[in-house]
Amino acid sequence: MTRKEIVDAVSCLDDEKRLQWLITLGWELTVCARAYYPRGPEGGSLEHLIAFNELQHQVFNYIRHSRTEHDWTIDRFVNGLCDKASASSVEGYFGAAMKSSVEAIAES
């Protein structure tokens, strides 16, 4: 799923649906981070666990501030997350989390 497809899918959501998407994305990031646990499929990586923690922090910070501040547009938010995931070399699992979260909100 491309960045544009993600932005297109979530930019048209109303506030409640967008909140649900963000919560689902946070949950999906938690699940995907487990790949980097010592016994996970990737064999463990503190660096990658930290990267997922930072991505989750961004998601929950967006939730905290989106109700009071409107300077962080959804396309800047999504692109920032994607850039951070790429720079941290977790784009594969991050992409899976994004895709799953968008699909989940589309089904609801």
Image: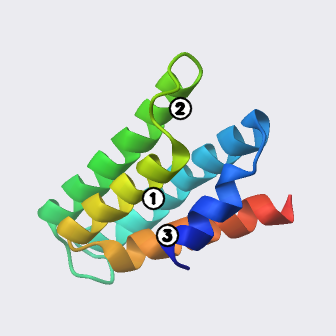
Residue under pointer 2: 63
Q: Which residue is mark 3?
A: 3
| Point 54% across, 27% down: residue | 66
Question: Where residue 80 sits: x, y (%)?
Answer: 34, 53
- The residue identified by callout 1 is 29
What's the amino acid at mark 3? Arg
**Residue in front for this viewpoint, 51 or 102:** 102
Give how far apart the Cα atoms at labels 3 and 1 are: 17 Å
On the question of residue 29 being in view, the answer is yes
Q: Residues within 10 Å of mark 3 (few under 14, many from 20)?
A: some
Position of residue 19 in the picture relative to residue 44 (left or right): right
Q: Which mark is residue 102?
A: none
Quadrant where the C terminus lies?
bottom right
Mark-to-mark CA distance, 2 and 3:
19 Å
Relative placement, left or right, of 76 versus 37 is right
Lateral position of residue 21 relative to residue 91, left or right:
right
Q: Secondary structure at mark 3?
A: helix
37 lies above or below 20: below
Q: Nearer the viewer, mark 2 or mark 3?
A: 3
Question: Which residue appears at 19% of the width and 67% of the height?
Answer: 87
Q: Amino acid at mark 1?
A: Leu
> Residue 80 vs residue 45: left or right?
right
Disc 2 marks a residue whose amino acid type is Ile
Dot 2 and dot 3 residues touching (CB under 8 Å): no
The image position of residue 61, as x and y in percent, is 42, 31
- Furthest-top residue in view? 68
Tell me: residue 78, above or below residue 58.
below
Image location (x, y in percent) of residue 83:
29, 63
Q: Nearer the viewer, mark 3 or mark 1?
A: 3
* Point 31% across, 56% down: residue: 52
**Marks 3,1: beta carbons within 8 A:** no
User: Considering only vertical position in the picture, is 23 above or below 105?
Assistant: above
